[in-house]
Image (cartoon, rainbow, N blue to C red):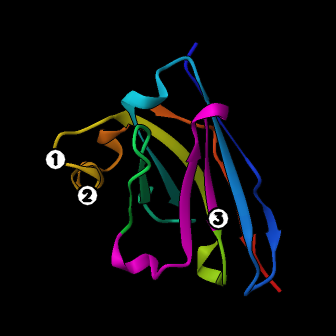
Amino acid sequence: EVQLQASGGGLVQPGGSLRLSCAASGFRFDDATFAWFRQAPGKEREGFIYIDGSDGTLWYPDSVEGRFTISSDKAKNTVYLQMKNLKFEDTAVYFCAAGPRQQYGLQATHALGVAGMDYWGRGTLVTVSS
């Protein structure tokens, strides 16, 4: 059975750090593109950081400002999201997602939005509050 299980969300103060994990099973890690999406109240679900499951290449749009880092551990079939300097506006439900590797790269996968992903985790809530 294909599963993505996200964990690690919770309450964090502004300026703090948090790491989310996404355990993947039921499909080939090397064949996948992984991403983290987030959805704030009243807003669309959007992908903001991506990683190639085969070679570890990552990509994120300029709006991320380097505060988030995605990484993976093939041996553990796990993708991570390291977040730092968190802000109030980072409050959202965070989803891990997986889709096929695309020949045009990670930015092209981002352009597809949710349509570029085949599998979804249940989401984990991150709340940034003082």
Which image quarter is the C terminus in? bottom right
Residue occupying the point 40% across, 44% down: 55
The first of marks 3 and 2 along the sequence is 3
Residue 66 in the magenta stretch? The answer is yes
The reply to whether dot 1 and dot 3 touch (C-beta < 8 Å) is no
Q: Position of residue 76 (x, y in %)?
A: 67, 33
Mark 2 sits on what residue?
107
Quadrant position of residue 63: bottom left
The first of marks 1 and 3 along the sequence is 3
Mark 1 sits on what residue?
104
Disc 1 secondary structure class: loop
Residue occupying the point 31% across, 50% down: 113
Disc 3 secondary structure class: strand
Mark 3 sits on what residue?
82
Q: What amino acid is labelled 3 in the image? A: Gln
Q: What amino acid is labelled 1 in the image? A: Tyr
Q: Position of residue 54 (x, y in %)?
A: 40, 37
Which residues fall within the magenta stretch? 61-82
Circle 2 crowding by C-alpha within 10 Å: few under 14, some 14–19, many from 20 = some
Residue 87 in the magenta stretch? The answer is no
Towards the viewer: 37 or 23: 23
**Residue 21 position (above or below residue 100):** below
**Residue 31 position (above or below residue 61):** above
